Image: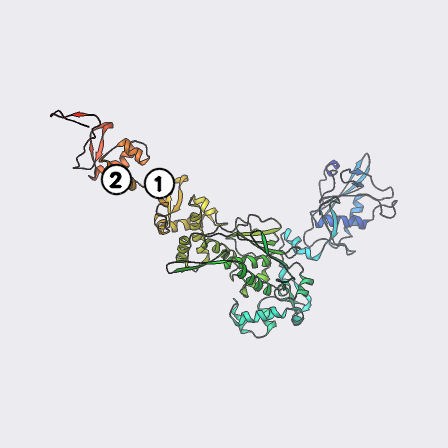
Amino acid sequence: MNHSFPPIEDLLGGETLEIEYKEDKEERFKAQPLPDDKIAEALMGLSNANGGYLLLGVTDPKKGRVTITGLSSARTGSVAQVGTRLLNKFVRTPHLATCEYLTAAGRVFAFYIEPAEPPPHQLTSGGFKIRKDLGGKQGPENFPFLLSEMPQWEAQRGIHSDFSSRAHADLPISRWGEMFNPLAVSLFQSRIREGRINNSSLAAISNFEQQLEALGIVSTVDGRKVMSNAALILFGSNDIIRERIPNHRAQFQVIRDEAVVHNLFTDKPGLEHRSLLLLADRLGELFRSVIERKELMDGLFRIDIPDYGDDAVREAAMNAFIHRDYTQTVEVIIQITSREFRVTSPGGFYRDVTPQNILFHEPCPRNRCLAQACADLGLVEKSGRGVDRIFWDQIRFMRPLPSYADSTTNSVRLSLLGGRGSLEAIKWMFERMKDVDDLTFRVVHGGLVHVLLMDGQTTREEMIASLPGLSESDGRRAITELVDAGIISRIGAGRGQRLVLSEMLQTSLGKPDAYRNQVGPTDEYRRKSILEFIHQHQQISRGEAAKLLNMPSDVNLFRRIIKPLVDTGELIAVGSGSGTKYRRPNEQVFERIDEETEFPNGNTDT
């Protein structure tokens, strides 16, 4: 292959994940050159990482003091001949380029190998390694390439395999009695009998193995039906899960007033069972016991308000197990405080899902087989849109919208903040949406109203952006529908336009003055203020009107406020110019006498 090698100085800045140095000496017999097997192993590690350069005849023994040692005096052949021999060491021929540098300190053979296109490269000798940088003084090194790392490696290269659908060829489904937790099997049958499932076909099947097939968690290998990872995650005993899927673990923590109330770990008292069926059931019990609830009354209207919504916590917890990266050696963490419900799931967002589009992104499960089985079992929203449930619970209880802001490339963190919202607002939301079956409609329309209930007023762009992933066209359409319904009002025009809750809605929420405070007094309100002033003071000048209404004393004041009152005959103008006064018609005005006045009979009065 053709490759343009840089000047050697550009490659002598120290070892990195993409640059490796090798001294051209055999480990035991120093007079011999480095064997081809060692060179091939180094190249394999580079290729299975990001690809890169291997310089033969260079060392960096003190990590920062790169030295050109040159080639062994015993080495024969050209760099191209060495490269040809190296290609024969690989199971699948890699893309390899060679170059020789001639320096004052000696000759250096350079190899460039491209990143491996899936599958990763292996040597014919059986070697299977990848170059990693784990930090510390050692720097990048080659490590064994573990099969458990394969899903993550493939995902990084755009190949998305379903970990949960992977088969265990040595575990025929007929051995379920040995491998499954009997309590999980019993719970499964109970859910079917009680109708707590979303796949009605399960109830019509009496054979357990056929029920597992209907769930889609049975794999076929060479014509034999065997267990998948999803089957073990849902039903497996602690021993088999610990052996085959050791990363399926959880931590549950509750903190109140800085005191740890619960700190439970998988396999320990409180979270004894790893089977996801049993784990989901146990987490439900814990949620019910630690999440406080309040019943609020408003006349005949009664509403049960938990600190965190039932649907939200269930979907958040289950999604953490369903969409986690099972190749990462960390557990799902659930933390509850009086202020926040937080779930941390190993593995970053899958494919192109981000915190900015998660709400309206189509269902995109990392573990599709497990996700579908959990939906059929009724453990999560059957449509795969559990994130809608999470958002809706926060919206309807008037709490801040869910946040994924603390997520990283290695973990997804969901934060739900608690708090008590306005009872009137909660009541309005329930009444408004109680007959709406479309969950997306509830989230969009309810979410937009929620923004104004929380923030008071905002722009159209900010309002649409508050719902992650809502398109501008859908957002505009929903806003127009809310305006037409008399729920939202537009104030102003153009770029300065603001959106607020309508006067009708704010009055119904027990805040009759809120709308006027947001948009300012209407012209009708200003006219009433002038009439009230005249009722108390008999007349008003334009200057007094401007001061009363906090408006400039200009033609705009006259045209918008005073002239309509004159035109309708409610006021008449007396005088002219700047001395004009306005008063009610047929109303005599008595001027105040401020100085001592002498009357004809000689008496005085003040």
Q: Amino acid at mark 2?
A: Glu
Query: What residue is disc 1 on?
Result: 520
Give residue 465's position: percent from left, percent from top: 48, 46
Query: What residue is disc 2 on?
Result: 532
Task: Choose mark 2 or mark 1, whichever is in front.
Answer: 2
Q: Residue at x 53, y 72 (%)?
A: 193
**Colour scheme shown:** rainbow
Give residue 401's position: percent from left, percent from top: 49, 51
Q: Relative to residue 293, is residue 489 drawn left or right?
A: left
Which of these two is toward me, 216 or 316? Answer: 316
Say few, some or many: other residues with alpha carbon within 10 Å of mark 2 (under 14 / 14 to 19 / 20 or more). Answer: few
Which of these two is toward me, 385 or 115? Answer: 385
Q: Relative to residue 54, is residue 398 drawn left or right?
A: left
Instruction: Examine the rendering and report whether any part of residue 298 can be seen.
Output: yes
Which of these two is toward me, 209 or 487? Answer: 487
Give residue 33's position: percent from left, percent from top: 85, 45
Q: Is 75 rendered above or below residue 269? A: above
Q: Is 513 rendered above or below residue 240? A: above
